[in-house]
Amino acid sequence: MIGAIHRRAAALAGARITGVLASSPPRSAQVAAEWQVSAYPSLDALLDDTSVDVVHICSPNATHAPFAMRALAAGKHVVCEKPLAVSVADAERMAETARNSGLVAAVPFVYRYHPLVREIRARRIDGEFGGWHLIHGSYLQDWMLSPQASGWRVDPVAGGPSRAFADIGSHWCDLVEWVSGERFAEVTASTSIAVDKRPAAGARTFEDASEPSASEEYMDVRTEDCAALLLRTASGVLASTTVSQVSAGRKNRLWFELDGARASAVFDQENPETIWLGGEDGARVISRDPGHGSAEQRRLSVLPRAMPRGTRNASRRSSPTRTPRSAATGRRACRPSTTDCAPPASPRRFSDPPVTARGQRCEEMKLGFLTACLPGWSLPRIAEWASGNGYEALEVAVWPRTGGRDFEASHLPVADFPAARAEETLALFAKHDLELSALAYYENHLHPDPERRAEIRTHFKHAVDAAAALGVPYVGTFIGRDWTKPVADNLREAERVFPELVDYAGERGVKVIIENCVMEGWHPDGYPGNLAYSPELWEWMFSLDLYLNWDPSHLTWIGIDPVKTIAPYIDRIVHAQAKDVELGSGDIDRYGFFGKAVDRPDPWDNGWWRYRVPGLGQVDWARVVDRLYEHGFTGTLSVEHEDPVWGGTEEKVAQGLKIAHRTLRPLVIG
C-alpha cells in the first residue's frame, strides 16, 4: 500500500521512477510490469544503478536501518518510512550517517501537510493560545480488528518490538510536537494485545481480512494492538494519548486537543476540513478556506484531501527531486494504487455543485463551445450570444495574442489578471447563467526552439493562475512534439517537462487536460505533431497525471472508433470537445492516409478529409453522447468550430454554432 503512495507522490513531485525491488524476484517482476519500470534483482543492483538519485524505503521496519545505511553509503538520497528504525541505537547511527553524508534523508510524516494543521501551528506561533496547560488525544484505526488480519507488522522480527505505536503512534507524537512546539521528554506507557493469535500469512495492509485466512498456521501475537501513554514535555506540560488498531469504525482517526492559557484547538483527521477553536467566551468551528487564514493554510488548501495531499507536499519538500529526477522504490509486496487522489476541495465559484472523485461536477452534462472560433468578438459579446442561443458553458481561449495560427484567440488576458478582473469575469458569467468549463491554451510544450518553449511554459502558468483565481478546474493544452527528434526521445522529454507543470497546476487546484488532436500541421511531413492522439499514448500520458479533453473527430479520421474509447478511459475524460469530421471530401485514393506530399503549401490541407460542425460529418453523435451518459460523464461537451464551410465570416461562424446546437441539444440533457 505505502509503496504505491510513494510512487505516486514521487511522480507528482517530478521524479522518474526507474525501478522497484519488492519482497521476492517474482513479486518485483510483477510490480515492475504494472508500473512499467525495471525490476531490480537485488539491493546491490539497485544501488549500483547510477541513474538512481533517490531511494524510497517502504519495506518492513527491521530493514529500514540496513537499507538506508547502504543507500547513503552508495551516495543516494533516502526517503524512509516510519518508524525510522526499531531501536534507538540504529536510529541514532542513521541520523549521524545522514548528517555526515551531506545527502537528503527524510521521514515522510505527511500529516504535517494538512492545511488546517498549518493553521493551528501558525496561530500558536502568533501567540493566540498562550502557554500550554494540557495536551491530549488519540490515534484509532480498525484494520486489525478481525482475528484474521495479519501481515509482517505482527511479526516482531520483521516489524520490530512495537506495532500499533510504532506504526501510528509515531505519527501522533510527531504531529503534536510539531504543531505545539513542545518536545516529549518523559513517558509512561502500557500496552495490550486484543487478539493473541493471528494467521502466519495475512492480508496486505488495509485489505479485507473478514474472510478466513488461507493459511492454516497461526502465530502468537507479540506486538501490541493498543497503547496508552502518559507523557510530559521538556517544559513540563502534561500530555496523554491512546493508540489502537482494533477500534471498530475508526478508519484513520488521528485526533488531538491542545489546551492553552488563552485558547484551545482540536484537529480530527477524519474531519480534516474543519478545526475547533475554544475560548473562555465560547467556541467556534473554522473551515479550510484558500481565501482566509494563515499563509501556509491558504497555500496548501488547493491540494487534494487527506493523506494524498500530505504525501504529495511532503514529497515535494523532503525529496530532492528539483535537481535529481530519478527514484527507485524498495517495498514489501503490495498492489499499486489504482485510485485517483480526491478532488480539490477549494470552493468552486460557478454555482458550487458537488464534485465527484474525478473532479467533475455532480450534475448533468452541459453543452458549451470553445471561444477560439470568434477571435474578433469580446468575451462579454460571446457570453451574451451563447446564453441567448441556448449554450450553457464556455471553454475560453486564452492565447497571449492572435495571428499565430487559425482558431486561436485571446478572450482573457491571463498574463495580467488581477483580482478585480477575476471578479468582473465571474460577474459576467453569473449574469448570463453560464459555466466557465476550462481555459484553453493549446500549444506545443516540446517545441524545438528553447525560447519559444519557454514562452509557452510561462504563459501556460499564467493560464493556470487565472484558472485558480476563477475557480475553473481545467486548463487545456497539447503535449506537442519536437519534430526534429524521434517519438521515443519526445516521450522522454515530455516526462521531464510535464511533471513541473502538473505539479504547478495541482498546487492551485487545477487539472491539466490534453486534447487528442493529431496536429499534423506541426510536422513538416504531416505526421503527428501532438503525441496524445491514440489510446496507447493516453495510457502513457496518464502516468504523468494528465487528463483528457476527449475529441471524437480526431479518432475518427485516424481509423479509431471513438465510442469504443469512452468506457476504458472515462475516469480520465473530464472534459470533451464536439467537433465532426467529413471523410472523403478529397481524393484519398490519390494521396493515401497521410495526405498530400508533393504539393502541400498549407500543412493543414491533407487532401482527403476536413473538419465539420457536429451533424455534418461522420461522427455518430447519438452513440457518442449516449455512451458518455452511460459511463457517468458529467463534464462539459464543448463545440470546437473549425468548419471551413461555416467559417470565413463571424456571421457564418455563428450559424455554424447554431447548427451544432441543433444537432446536440436534443441529445444533451440540460
Image (spheres, helix red, strand yellow):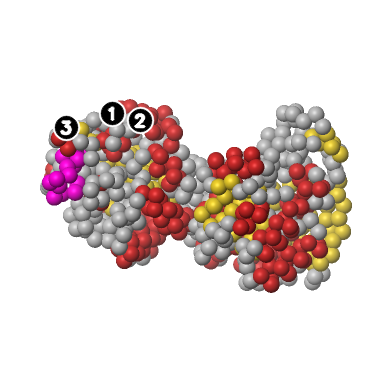
Looking at the image, residue 658 lies above or below residue 466: above
Q: Earlier in the sequence, mark 1 or mark 3?
A: 3
Residue 367, percent across and down? 31, 39
Distance from disc 1 to disc 2, alpha carbons, whole Å, reads: 9 Å
Which amino acid type is marked by label 2? Val
Depth check: 162 or 526 in front?
526
Q: Is residue 333 magenta?
A: no
Residue on which disc 2 sits: 563
Residue 618 occupies which quadrant of the picture?
top left
Which amino acid type is marked by label 3? Asp
Residues shaded magenta: 595-613
Pointers 1 and 2 in contact (C-beta within 8 Å): yes
Depth check: 316 or 130 in front?
316
Judging from the image, what secondary structure is the residue with disc 3 in?
helix
Judging from the image, what secondary structure is the residue with disc 1 in?
loop
Q: Earlier in the sequence, mark 1 or mark 2?
A: 2
Residue 245 vs residue 472: left or right? right
Residue 210, percent across and down? 72, 31
- Look at the image and tell me whether residue 319 can be seen: yes
Assess disc 2: are there few (<14), some (14-19) or many (≥20) residues with their C-alpha within 10 Å of its C-alpha. Answer: some
Residue on which disc 3 sits: 589
Q: Which mark is residue 472?
A: none
Residue on which disc 1 sits: 620
Pointers 2 and 3 in contact (C-beta within 8 Å): no
Residue 660, percent across and down? 23, 36
User: Which residue is located at x 29 percent, y 30 percent?
Assistant: 621
Residue 68, percent across and down? 69, 59
